[in-house]
Image (spheres, rainbow, N blue to C red):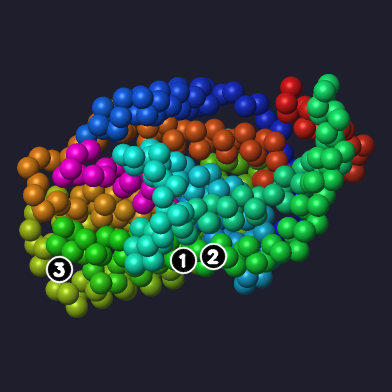
Amino acid sequence: MSELSEPRPVNHKFLTPGVIVLLILAANGLIWVFLRFILGIGAVTNLNNEFPWGIWIGIDVAAGVALAAGGFTTSALAHIFHREHFHDIVRPALLTAMLGYTFVALGVFIDLGRYYSIWHMFIYWNGNSVLFEVGVCVLTYVTVLYIEFIPIVTERFVGRVDLPGLWARFNRALDKVLRFLDRNINRAMFFFIIAGVVLSCLHQSSLGTLMMIAGQKIHPLWQSPISPLLFLISAISVGFPMVIMESIISHRSFGLKDEMDVLSSLARFIGPLLGVYLAFKMGDMVIRETFVYLTEFTLESVLWIIEVLIGVIIPLRMFLWDKVLQSKPLIFAASLMVIFGVFLNRFNVFIVAYTPSYMTTKYWPSIGEISVTLGFIAIEVLLYRIFVMIFPVIAQPMRRPQVKTKYAIRGIIR
């Protein structure tokens, strides 16, 4: 953390025209989620026996897991590799990952036909199942993320618990709990950071394993024996661009000074990571001779070229150019390209490249599926805005010493 900055709640109005749009999208998505549980999954989706999954898995889960990778990549960089310069961006990345993985879990829950049997995973263990490993790792990592966020909560409210009315009797007890958590979790935090990195690497790669065992159902351009490695490297590569995009957008939204010195330093890691990913992807294509499919003008070949050209090659060149690293618009554009590339990759693998053995119709997402996906994204953005206005997440220039005002839990409840 910089000596001239400190994380503290953002003082800014909540309701803006953009927030109103997000609230409308969120409300629409929640209505469709309600209909899904009341009328059944078949009433609001175009899923069937041929296509058991759609954009709720391809986008909300597969792409969502990858785009939430900024949490473990920045934690590893700042805490494991001791790059102290990047501490200012760890908390926003942690919050983004926490919200992202929460909605990944919710996405899986609403996509299950018999959602009420989700507890079976915790009782009937199948150590040979890739899905079991993914499910356990994701749920465990979600728990770890919330534990890592506890010190931010205690920092905000220790010594400031002032519940109103009948709740006042719990003030002292709640403060003691917060102090206990702050004291003990900080001692074990390094263990949780290590656990988070390990768990992330496991389930990021296992999503590639899941599609690898689909065999001939996956188009050869994406069906590869090194899919687990490609999924892991691409997730690591998109972690830092997600942090950069989130930082630039949030600072602009709240009218804060940008962190270009930190972001420029962070962006220097992206080029080499993309280079490693591109080398493995192209090497795999040469060895398996799947480049022959690029000579055919098909939807798969066009999307593969777009995915690699816009999502990997162009931003790779940009992140190796000092002019880009010193320019906020250019570094933002390059980061968006990487994010788009990984998003498109997961969409291609789980939706475009997947062909059932006995397909009679094409899959197109329904209005309900699209509404839920957009609604979840809107809710994540709204929750991020709420969290950074309540908790010390975003680093801001240090203020001059002054008399502290009492801003307690009671103020938030009211």
Q: Nearer the viewer, residue 102 or 315?
A: 102
Q: Are marks 1 and 3 in contact (CB under 8 Å)?
A: no
Q: Main secondary structure of the magenta part?
A: helix
Say which label, 1 or 3, has the lower sequence index: 1
Indicate the quadrant where residue 29 lies.
top left
Q: Is mark 2 on a helix, strand or loop?
A: helix
**Kind of residue at disc 1:** Cys
Q: Is mark 3 on a helix, strand or loop?
A: helix
Taking the spot 83% from the left edge, 33% from the top edge, the residue there is: 170
Q: How far apart are marks 2 and 3 (CA)?
A: 34 Å
Q: Look at mark 2 in the image and give the residue it sits on.
A: 197
Q: Considering the image in quadrants, where does the N terminus appear?
A: bottom right
Q: Is residue 29 above or below residue 306?
A: above
**Kind of residue at disc 3:** Phe
Taking the spot 73% from the left edge, 58% from the top edge, the residue there is: 185
Q: Do the residues labelled 2 and 3 touch (CB within 8 Å)?
A: no
Q: Look at mark 3 in the image and give the residue it sits on.
A: 291
| Residue stretch in magenta | 47-66
Q: Do the residues labelled 1 and 2 touch (CB within 8 Å)?
A: yes
**Kind of residue at disc 2:** Val
Q: Can residue 111 be seen in this snapshot?
A: no
Q: Which of 20 and 387 is in front in this view?
A: 387
Indicate the quadrant where residue 288 lies.
bottom left
Number of labelled discs?
A: 3
Q: Is residue 288 above or below residue 359?
A: below
Q: Which mark is residue 201?
A: 1
